[in-house]
Image (cartoon, rainbow, N blue to C red):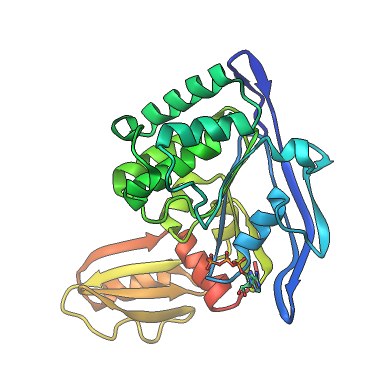
Amino acid sequence: MALDVQHAGARVRHAVEVSGLRKRYGDIVALDDVEFTVGPGELFGFVGSNGAGKTTAMRIMLGVLAADAGEVRFDGKPIDRETRARIGYMPEERGLYPKMTVRDQLVYLARLHGLTTNDAHTATENWIRRLGLADRRDDEIQKLSLGNQQRVQLAAALVHDPALLVLDEPFSGLDPVAVDVMSEVLKEKAAQGVPVVFSSHQLALVEGLCDRVGIIRDGAMVAVGSIDELTADVTTRLRVSVEAAAGWADDIEGARVLGEDRGATLIELARDGDEQAVLRAAMAAGTVTEFSRHRPTLADLFRNVVIEGNAQ
Ligand SMILES: Nc1ncnc2c1ncn2[C@@H]1O[C@H](COP(=O)(O)OP(=O)(O)OP(=O)(O)O)[C@@H](O)[C@H]1O
């Protein structure tokens, strides 16, 4: 998706390209030829098991960790000190000063990124209000709940109006209201043309929010694309209920019974399987009260490529 967005009078159009990233820690291969791009206005979800390499890739994108090979280009150029200052980053190990107040912390970080004192105060107040922290602005960070600390961490990533957002598990530990606020803010930044990359283990959330996803397994990117593109090859599942019938689906060619769920039979259809054959067998067995196709989800895809090890 390539957006060309008019925002606050300025045309915003940025992209980040990651190519051939390799990183080892001794014998551990943390990244093995990782490649993906995030275009202007795109929300990119980075998923993978614990230890798959997400944090390593994101830290390299920021330039805080050196890769053994490969490169990260922002707007076509390698990331240097100047570009780094334009990235909004939310690290996994949250890095706030515990004894600073919310407001002082945000103003300080905004100034560090080059905002004037006036602009730093204005941006701080905006994000404090937007992220529901108005009652907390004079509290020390260490006195906030974990979820509120995370809201401050998000404000810290946004306060300098970044041209690229890289967020390491921004949703972990948030209550449902904060999840909604975070989602809205990420969508809004993307709509302004900013590429947004975030990692998460909450697959349903990633699926609902992202234009494209990347699935990483043992340091290698095993799938990159939109959910529709990536799930096109995942086998179809059917859910069928037939009144007072058992074993009716056991011998249908191209169909495999996965199990029972609240009175329904769950069936996996081979790629060349015929769902009408399943329907005919069900109708021959009794009264069919339910027949539905389960659209493959990111969770199915994840199971397929990460747990079962099938490449996309
Ligand atoms: N500083 C380090 N020294 C040695 N090994 C490391 C270091 N940092 C990461 N690793 C290893 O590199 C691999 C990738 O780790 P990384 O933190 O990037 O994974 P992740 O996908 O972010 O995991 P999680 O979902 O648990 O946050 C893991 O095997 C990890 O143990």
Q: Quadrant of residue 306?
A: bottom right
Can residue 145 be seen from the camera position used here?
yes
Q: Which of the four quarters of the rendered structure image does ligand 1 lie in? A: bottom right
- Please provide percent x and percent y for residue 120: 54, 24
| In-front residue for pair 192/311 | 192
Q: Quadrant of residue 265?
A: bottom left
- Please provide percent x and percent y for residue 189: 54, 32
Vertical position of residue 105 compared to residue 222: above or below: above
Vertical position of residue 254 compared to residue 226: above or below: below
Outermost residue to the left = 244
Q: Quadrant of the C terminus?
A: bottom right
Vertical position of residue 103 compared to residue 236: above or below: above
**Left/right of residue 202 with respect to residue 70 in the rendered view:** left
Q: Quadrant of the N terminus?
A: top right
Which residue does the image show at 42% across and 68% down from the upper left? Answer: 237
Which residue does the image show at 83% across and 40% down from the upper left? Answer: 77
| In-front residue for pair 52/126 | 126
| In-front residue for pair 299/187 | 187
| In-front residue for pair 213/231 | 213
Which residue does the image show at 65% across and 29% down from the upper left? Answer: 3
Label total for image: 0
Can residue 160 be seen from the camera position used here?
no
- Please provide percent x and percent y for residue 64: 70, 53
